[in-house]
């Protein structure tokens, strides 16, 4: 039978995407590895490759379609001996076990009563593979409380048909759950908190005022959803310190003179990345992520750095940052930032890490509080360096270049004293930059 080509999940967090461009047309022969389409995710535009060989029999989703859910059929692939005529309302030609289903479905449609509810959506197995079942089989399974993942299909290519569902026995799990629920009846549900004004309510508020409506793209929707969830579910707390930068600025100037012939120019941000990476090794309990019912403590220092792009941001990850030289970190960061702005990063380059850095100092911001990006344990918000009067070690008033930082921490992973120890290590690394080269 013709094979459905499904909308792929090109990243672990992808739920829907935009079919930006088809690279094939109906009637084209394709082999495994051939490019089929360009898919826009919330982060990047990526190429989608064929898994099987065959002929593109029908394109189901038009080029430019937005909000296409993962695992939605987007095209039909014909195998050898199949033709476009094989693509019909039914997923495959009926076989002996399925032939008996046709009269039943026909009689349902002809009944004077209201038309039956549509069959539940095709389920997927634990590894994301679609489970093929006829509409009637899905409907009967839903009525009987059966899990299609537990049923072996006898139809073509393992497709589950009516006879398979009727032969299966319902699992007792649902029945067993009822007495348990009766032991402690749930309290009456509290009224849900308002989720904020709806689009219609806002439109009415500004009726008569001139405005431009800006449609949200996938990246902005994802940022809004993830950061709203993060702020609501992560118990944030904040630690603040001032860092004297004079020694670092002097050292940076000396290094840049020596590296000029190699075309390397270190930024203050390069030192901050190195300082955080080293601090995570000095306080290893903070080099961790929240994993739902446990904490994963990582060995390497994988540091994420926020990069602003048009319409949103990326957080590319510098892996093993504690093991790399300042010049290597600088070159890698420049490359990641450039490709982030071009939306050319692979998912593996912006996923992971245990700790993040967000530097708005280059925009003149003195200080700010950043939101922890789950599953990270924390994020360092970096302000600009400004000259301030300070009291020196000898008690005399002097002027120093001071940078304000705020560390936002997930209290489920890092407690107050532990967070203070990590921030202290970051400060000491930056105020004594020579130690980072040891």
Image: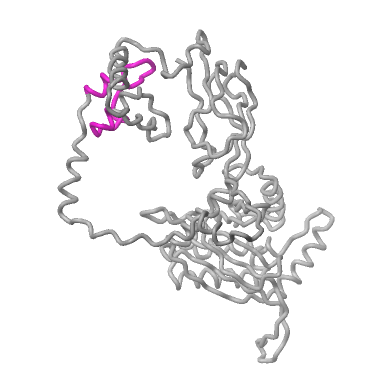
Quadrant containing the N terminus in the rendered view: top left
Residue at x-position 64% and y-position 68%: 435
Residue 53 falls left or right of residue 271: left
Which of 208 and 162 lies nearest the eye of the viewer? 208
Instruction: Classify 136 as above or below 222.
Output: above
Instruction: Classify 218 as above or below 135.
Output: below
Residue 110 pos. (x, y %): 30, 20
Quarter holding residue 115: top left
Residue 418 pos. (x, y %): 46, 70
Q: Is residue 61 magenta?
A: no
Residue 4 pos. (x, y %): 48, 23
Quadrant containing the C terminus in the rendered view: bottom right
Q: Name the magenta segment's main secondary structure.
A: helix
Quarter holding residue 361: bottom right
Residue 15 falls left or right of residue 359: left
Residue 433 pos. (x, y %): 67, 68
Farthest-out residue, top: 81
Q: Is residue 377 visible?
A: yes
Residue 379 falls left or right of residue 154: right
Magenta stretch: give its range.
Answer: 140-167
Farthest-out residue, right: 261
Residue at x-position 62% and y-position 64%: 275
Q: Is residue 288 visible?
A: no
Residue at x-position 55% and y-position 48%: 351
Q: Is residue 161 magenta?
A: yes
Which of 318 and 344 lies nearest the eye of the viewer? 344
């Amino acid at each position: 039978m013709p094979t459905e080509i499904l909308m792929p999940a090109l990243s672990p967090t992808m739920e829907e995407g935009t079919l930006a461009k088809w690279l094939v047309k109906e009637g084209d022969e394709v082999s495994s590895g051939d490019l089929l389409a360009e898919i826009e995710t919330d982060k990047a535009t990526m190429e989608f490759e064929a898994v099987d060989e065959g002929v593109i029999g029908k394109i189901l989703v038009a080029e430019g379609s937005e909000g296409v859910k993962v695992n939605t059929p987007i095209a039909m692939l014909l195998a050898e001996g199949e033709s476009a005529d094989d693509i019909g309302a039914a997923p495959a030609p009926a076989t002996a076990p399925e032939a008996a289903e046709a009269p039943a479905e026909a009689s349902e449609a002809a009944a004077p009563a209201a038309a039956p509810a549509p069959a539940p959506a095709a389920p997927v197995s634990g590894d994301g593979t679609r489970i093929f079942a006829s509409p009637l089989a899905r409907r009967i399974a839903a009525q009987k409380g059966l899990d299609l993942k537990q049923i072996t299909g006898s139809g073509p290519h393992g497709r589950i048909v009516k006879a398979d569902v009727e032969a299966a026995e319902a699992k007792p799990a649902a029945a067993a759950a009822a007495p348990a629920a009766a032991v402690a009846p749930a309290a009456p549900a509290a009224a849900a908190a308002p989720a904020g004004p709806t689009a219609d309510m806002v439109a009415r508020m500004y009726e008569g005022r001139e405005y431009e409506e800006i449609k949200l793209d996938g990246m902005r929707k994802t940022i809004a959803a993830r950061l709203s969830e993060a702020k609501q579910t992560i118990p944030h707390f904040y630690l603040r310190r001032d860092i004297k930068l004079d020694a670092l600025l002097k050292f940076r100037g000396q290094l840049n003179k020596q590296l000029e012939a190699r075309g390397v120019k270190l930024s203050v941000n390069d030192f901050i990345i190195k300082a955080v990476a080293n601090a995570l090794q000095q306080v290893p309990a903070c080099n961790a992520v929240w994993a739902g019912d446990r904490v994963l403590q990582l060995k390497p220092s994988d540091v994420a750095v926020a990069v602003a792009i048009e319409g949103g941001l990326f957080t590319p990850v510098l892996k093993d940052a504690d093991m790399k030289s300042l010049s290597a970190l600088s070159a890698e960061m420049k490359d990641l930032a450039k490709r982030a702005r071009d939306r050319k990063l692979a998912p593996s380059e912006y996923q992971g890490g245990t700790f993040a850095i967000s530097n708005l100092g280059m925009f003149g911001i003195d200080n700010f509080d950043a939101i922890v990006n789950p599953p990270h344990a924390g994020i360092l918000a970096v302000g600009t360096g400004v000259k301030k009067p300070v009291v020196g070690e000898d008690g005399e008033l002097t002027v120093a270049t001071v940078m304000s930082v705020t560390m936002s921490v997930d209290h489920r992973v890092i407690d107050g004293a532990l967070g203070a120890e990590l921030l202290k290590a970051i400060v000491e690394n930056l105020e004594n930059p020579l130690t980072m080269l040891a």
